[in-house]
Amino acid sequence: MKIGFIGLGQMGRGMAARLLERGHELVVWNRTRAAVEAAEARGARVALRVEDVLQNEVVITMLADDAAVEAVWITPALLQKMPAGSLHLNMASVSLRMAKRLTGLHQVCGAQYVSAPVFGRPQAAASGQLDIVAAGPKDAIARCAALFEALGKQWFDLGTEPAQANIVKIARNYLLGTIVESLGEAFALVGKSGVEPAKFLEIITSTSMNSPAYRNYGRMIVEKPEHATFTLKLGMKDVELALQAGGETGVPMPMGAVMREQHLAAINRGYGERDWASLGNYIAESAGL
Amino acid sequence: MKIGFIGLGQMGRGMAARLLERGHELVVWNRTRAAVEAAEARGARVALRVEDVLQNEVVITMLADDAAVEAVWITPALLQKMPAGSLHLNMASVSLRMAKRLTGLHQVCGAQYVSAPVFGRPQAAASGQLDIVAAGPKDAIARCAALFEALGKQWFDLGTEPAQANIVKIARNYLLGTIVESLGEAFALVGKSGVEPAKFLEIITSTSMNSPAYRNYGRMIVEKPEHATFTLKLGMKDVELALQAGGETGVPMPMGAVMREQHLAAINRGYGERDWASLGNYIAESAGL
Amino acid sequence: MKIGFIGLGQMGRGMAARLLERGHELVVWNRTRAAVEAAEARGARVALRVEDVLQNEVVITMLADDAAVEAVWITPALLQKMPAGSLHLNMASVSLRMAKRLTGLHQVCGAQYVSAPVFGRPQAAASGQLDIVAAGPKDAIARCAALFEALGKQWFDLGTEPAQANIVKIARNYLLGTIVESLGEAFALVGKSGVEPAKFLEIITSTSMNSPAYRNYGRMIVEKPEHATFTLKLGMKDVELALQAGGETGVPMPMGAVMREQHLAAINRGYGERDWASLGNYIAESAGL
Amino acid sequence: MKIGFIGLGQMGRGMAARLLERGHELVVWNRTRAAVEAAEARGARVALRVEDVLQNEVVITMLADDAAVEAVWITPALLQKMPAGSLHLNMASVSLRMAKRLTGLHQVCGAQYVSAPVFGRPQAAASGQLDIVAAGPKDAIARCAALFEALGKQWFDLGTEPAQANIVKIARNYLLGTIVESLGEAFALVGKSGVEPAKFLEIITSTSMNSPAYRNYGRMIVEKPEHATFTLKLGMKDVELALQAGGETGVPMPMGAVMREQHLAAINRGYGERDWASLGNYIAESAGL
């Protein structure tokens, strides 16, 4: 398929590489030049102006956050420049508010819009092992199916309302945050009584909590990796997306509320650029360990 | 093995049945008569006085909570009446404080004490599918191994300090509570935007949260079973055990703190005798769903 | 003084009336016509276009929130249309972010900008009994002093940085919220043991908590007035302004975090349009009273 | 009046001195000898055995906490040794549970029991400036009135149920805690934007928060006194008394819940033996100030 691709950040570059590998034709654009070179080396055509990626069947955007969508997509009115019949596939995470706003803008223009945020870190993006939650008009989803199969190990169809894919992504990332915080508290609790967190982790992941999320975050809390694949600051942004969506739709989330403040305190203690898992290390510190 | 067994509640009666089935000889005692009849029918001898269960190699206690341990075990000074060389195997959940107190009392008397709380609901108890976390003197643990194998699908040796098994149990149950609360909040969040919680559950348990705890509690929040196997009130007790242990060892647990208050509010709304999972239904109600 | 006045909401109309009473000349504008009639009857000139209020020594804005400032002041670029040497006196509450943005915009234009949010409900506005916290360039503050004296029973000079007046207003309103929530919890606590909240209120306001805020909010929680002078929904907005400012400047506010969720739950229970004090009634309900 | 006085801690010694000064005859007892000497020097008779204070019209107890009441009063069964017609006046703070238990024990023995906890720090105790909340049988209260007038600048009659005085004391101290925490958060919020907390304090205590509690705690947060008159650890105990009472009577107190965890974290950072007000300094530290 001929694909325009906007946004070659950590996730986007892996996804672009994967699509090229699977034989798709890509025209890519990124705000900084450096990021496009790897894609070019893999056979992508590099657009000098962002408008030049629009002449394709599908335009994928993978922009960092609401502000990036505002700056790159909405303010330059790219939507109005898309040819009739083309499709905008937004695979990045945005707020519920932005999701609804984008849906409205596309409806006004009569353009097809699919929201399909992904679960997974950059490595999963590069190897086609993402989990994808998609929502949008039935025929638009159908047009994207081949892309979802290239990029994901599975994908879920959430119906015709694009924002519903976003709220699922937001709620799922929120749950990841609750796992980090709760593991951090539980590790501190057993640790203060002399039980090794690694031992505790082995027990719970051998029993009712034997899921990748507990294993991966638990291991990272224990091992304290130098390199962050997803920073605590970004984790805080995800918690805030959940709280904001909760505020707009009327969902009290007291657990999320205290988590956000924990993130703020952890950032003040220097954990902001470390991995999200380091929230657990902040909790240990706060417990005097 | 000749076993004394005190406490035939929902969990105890299943465990006793299992031990009988595996060929052990049991003398059982319970505060109410009704509970012992099923064990008697399965071949247990029924003690009329609690002292009469003490003349056995191992005495298992499976008492509901600290208050029951105080009333049944400590106040009548059963410990002093145990024959030399016998072993007290406490498989119930008690507070960290009570765990340390029991350890101290047994040390003073020179009696062997193993703490081995279990994970699992009554059905797992009856079918030998518990997970067991054990701690106590090395040789005492060795003497209990056959019992752990009869009762559990796996067991973990947490070293020589009995209270460490208890803190692991407390921390693990605390994590279960965080799963219920966080799922409740996430379900309410997606539900308010029109996504079916069951659909959301399917997605997260097909991806990074595919563990029994998410599946079981998630399903119960969705299905709202009439019958509680573990009530919300008991769940609140578990959260309080964690907070109390945190207070005594100096571990701030802000997530646990708000969870406790959620339980209190849910009880005021009539959820106390429903399953722990119904905390999620309270959260939905509180979100106006 | 010749004053332009934009925004005749509940607060603005009282302030405008007071200024007229004290002999100032006012040109007023409001988004809806109805609100200006009372001011006109009192001698104000009514501007048909918002631009027509700009030709005055001082232009006071009293707009409801950030969105209103954006719509009425920023988008139509009123700032660029102000005559040289005039002064914009913003007496409304805006977010810390908006306060900084407005400061920046005025600096760029070389216009004088004073931020002077007020404490007090509409009745205090109409009777010159407000408390005013002002910040801005020294000479600009000096120019506003007579207005502060007309409108307030006292005013505080917070220095040259306009946003510092806003953060003081935000933090003070945040404290009001904590008083409502904490009184609500304390009333429920004594109430559940059979002590009348009114009796408890009498005791604490006769001792270490004898301040207007405790007296007024306490009395309103007890008396549950039909008519709201400041709604719970607006109170929630104030709590959110504090949390947002905390997020931007790195201040964990765990108490504020749980308060926001309480407001959300109270709104779902129908308290949104009642007085802020009704948060205490929600808390009583949640305690099963 | 002839008074037995048990418990000469920081508060008790001031109260005893005050009663002697006002002409009452005291027989005093304390667990440690050192504390009684000052009272002896002021004219009190010192009892060698605690039983020896019981032969008086009124026996005042001012014991540190539930554990001290248990050890000094309940375990030695002092109640049974009181002469007929004597009255036990408990002026210390105990938990709601202990308050009810003491009431029950006295009813069984047919002894008169008045609960009359006090508000105020040691200096107020020594100068008769306490605030006293009393509850108990009408005639018993009447018998104590002269003592309340000697010790307090005012006293409140809360009716016939002793525990109601205790819940009022618990709820009032809880409110003090909320003031410390909320001031701490508000100070950090304005401080991070460059506003001096002392300036902010001046503003709020000149307006709607002009009460002793805001002034005193606010000043202590700003001035960070070396010497604690009431430690943060004791403050945490008070918050826990409120949460415990809330748990027993079914009152969700989410604000209290997060406050307790803040205290725990502050203790881990070394604030436990500093004044309760230092919770505000912990909050500033946690905000990176």
Image (tube, coloured by chain):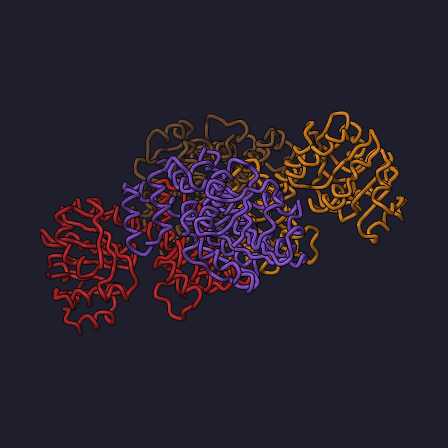
Chain colours: A brown, B orange, C red, D purple
Q: Is residue A3 in sight in this rendering? A: no
Which residue is more in the foreground, D178 or D87? Answer: D87
Give the mark count: 0
Which residue is more in the foreground, A116 or B148? Answer: B148
At horizontal 35% and vertical 29% (from top left) the residue drawn is A34
Residue A140: percent from the left, percent from the top?
47, 50
Q: Quadrant of residue C27?
A: bottom left
Residue C88: percent from the left, percent from the top?
17, 54
The relative height of residue B269 versus residue A54 in the rendered view (above or below) is below
Relative side of D287 to B241, left or right: left
Which residue is more in the foreground, B131 or D128? Answer: D128
Q: Is residue C87 in sight in this rendering? A: yes
The relative height of residue A240 versus residue D225 in the rendered view (above or below) is below
At horizontal 50% and vertical 56% (from top left) the residue drawn is D168
Relative side of C14 to D11, left or right: left
Relative side of A227 to D201, left or right: right
Please identify the residue farthest to the left as the structure is shown.
C84
At horizontal 20% and vertical 49% (from top left) the residue drawn is C157
At horizontal 53% and vertical 49% (from top left) the residue drawn is D92
